[in-house]
């Protein structure tokens, strides 16, 4: 009967579902990614305890317990019991959850710290009220508890995006590095599991007046560009219009990667970036152009238009790509046209070299280099030709062997 009840309880424990904090609907982000568990699977002397002993230690029902572990004897306390709650799963999940709630509201700071360390593991079985407590303890009076809460937020963010949504948004904006840095690490890890949720955070951050936050948010665009679809493209577009140069630079760095996955979107964004006032943004746009398929008509037009750009570096990069884009005859025509308006001496020299046709204007040796030599005559064919009295190439025919079509010889033989 006990086994049946345990299976029933295990069946009732539902997997955590990420929900949009504004609508309450599940976030449609595809299959949830599996996170590494080496940080969650805590190791300690409580591994030598039974589940009931861990539970009794965590609630204070047992004041102490002695075990042999790792070659020594250890006296376990309530802190050890709380840290061991991650082992209580399945039919023990409800009791572990209740015990963790008691630990989170404990008057002792070291017990609250232990509870925060194991919170992400227990939350995988049951998360009710746990993230509310996490939000409270982020502002705890004890600095050790605040630090543990920040690290807990970092670990929980990739797995429980809706549970920590408001707390994460608050900590990202903190001016205290000890609080903001774990939050940013958690947001970066979230790009691997729920990129659409990250896009929501980036969207809000890009609207803030603080350029420091906009810069940090724009750096994450590289992590979501391949996974977030249209939401990611919109964020890149908005970031390319930002007033801050660094934000635009970070956004333009995604164009090369985007061109491999969504070339048409990348071309449209690159057309804007190549006209940017910042040199680094333009250079990133040029790198994106180099990675594009030049057979695409829009990409070809982008390169051709770039050869007449007002910035000399843009013109240089686009002119350098012309030989890859055009056949020789067309290349000479285009280079001749560009020479009429080009003012930069170095680029004029480059274009002049493109108009030069060695087969016509070159030296005798250069012209001869374009003449293909005749293919050698196989030895067997030479032997047959000689046997028939025929010449091979520029050779004279053998004198002692009459030609087969020699009419005078045929007349003498007939007489």
Image: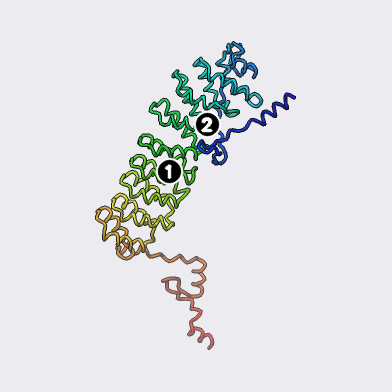
Residue drawn at 37 percent across, 61 percent down: 328
Residue 46: x percent and y percent?
60, 17
Q: Is 283 left, or right, of 143 in this rendering?
A: left
Q: Determine which residue is flagged by label 1.
A: 235
* Picture quadrant of residue 2: top right
Residue drawn at 32 percent across, 59 percent down: 354
Image quarter where the N terminus lies is top right
State the residue lying farthest toward the front.
23
State which mark lies toward you, 1 or 2: 2
Q: Nearer the viewer, residue 396 or 175?
A: 175
Q: Determine which residue is flagged by label 2.
A: 163
Q: Nearer the viewer, residue 239 or 271?
A: 239
Residue 71: x percent and y percent?
59, 14
Residue drawn at 47 percent across, 67 percent down: 377
Residue 415: x percent and y percent?
53, 88
In terms of sequence position, does the residue under pointer 1 or pointer 2 come before the other?
Answer: 2
């Amino acid at each position: 009967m006990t086994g049946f009840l345990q299976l029933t309880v295990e069946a009732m424990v539902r997997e955590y579902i990420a929900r949009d904090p504004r609508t309450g609907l599940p976030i449609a982000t595809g299959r949830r990614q599996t996170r590494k568990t080496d940080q969650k699977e805590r190791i300690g002397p409580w591994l030598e305890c039974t589940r009931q002993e861990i539970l009794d230690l965590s609630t204070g029902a047992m004041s102490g317990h002695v075990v042999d572990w790792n070659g020594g004897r250890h006296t376990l306390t309530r802190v050890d019991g709380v840290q061991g709650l991650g082992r209580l799963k399945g039919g023990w999940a409800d009791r572990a959850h209740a015990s963790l709630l008691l630990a989170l509201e404990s008057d002792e700071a070291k017990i609250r710290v232990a509870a925060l360390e194991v919170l992400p593991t227990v939350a995988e079985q049951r998360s009710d009220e746990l993230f509310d407590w996490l939000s409270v303890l982020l502002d705890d009076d004890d600095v050790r508890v605040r630090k543990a809460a920040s690290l807990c937020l970092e670990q929980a963010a990739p797995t429980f995006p809706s549970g920590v949504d408001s707390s994460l948004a608050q900590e990202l904006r903190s001016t205290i590095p000890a609080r903001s840095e774990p939050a940013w690490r958690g947001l970066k890890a979230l790009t691997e599991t729920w990129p659409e949720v990250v896009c929501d955070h980036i969207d809000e951050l890009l609207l803030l007046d603080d350029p420091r936050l906009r810069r940090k948010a724009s750096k994450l665009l590289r992590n979501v560009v391949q996974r977030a679809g249209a939401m990611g493209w919109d964020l890149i577009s908005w970031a390319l219009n930002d007033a801050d140069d660094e934000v635009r630079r970070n956004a333009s760095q995604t164009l090369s990667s985007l061109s491999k996955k969504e070339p048409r979107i990348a071309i449209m964004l690159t057309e804007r970036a190549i006209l940017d006032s910042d040199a680094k943004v333009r250079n990133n746009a040029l790198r994106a152009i180099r990675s594009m398929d030049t057979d695409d008509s829009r990409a070809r037009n982008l390169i051709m238009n770039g050869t007449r750009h007002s910035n000399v570096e843009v013109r240089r990069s686009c002119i350098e790509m012309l030989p890859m884009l055009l056949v020789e005859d067309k290349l000479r025509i285009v280079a001749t046209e560009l020479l009429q308006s080009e003012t930069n001496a170095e680029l004029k020299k480059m274009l002049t070299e493109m108009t030069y046709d060695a087969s016509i204007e070159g030296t005798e040796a250069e012209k001869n280099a374009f003449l293909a030599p005749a293919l050698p005559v196989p030895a067997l064919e030479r032997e047959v030709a000689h046997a028939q009295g025929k010449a091979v190439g520029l050779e004279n025919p053998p004198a002692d062997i009459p030609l087969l079509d020699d009419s005078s010889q045929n007349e003498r033989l007939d007489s």
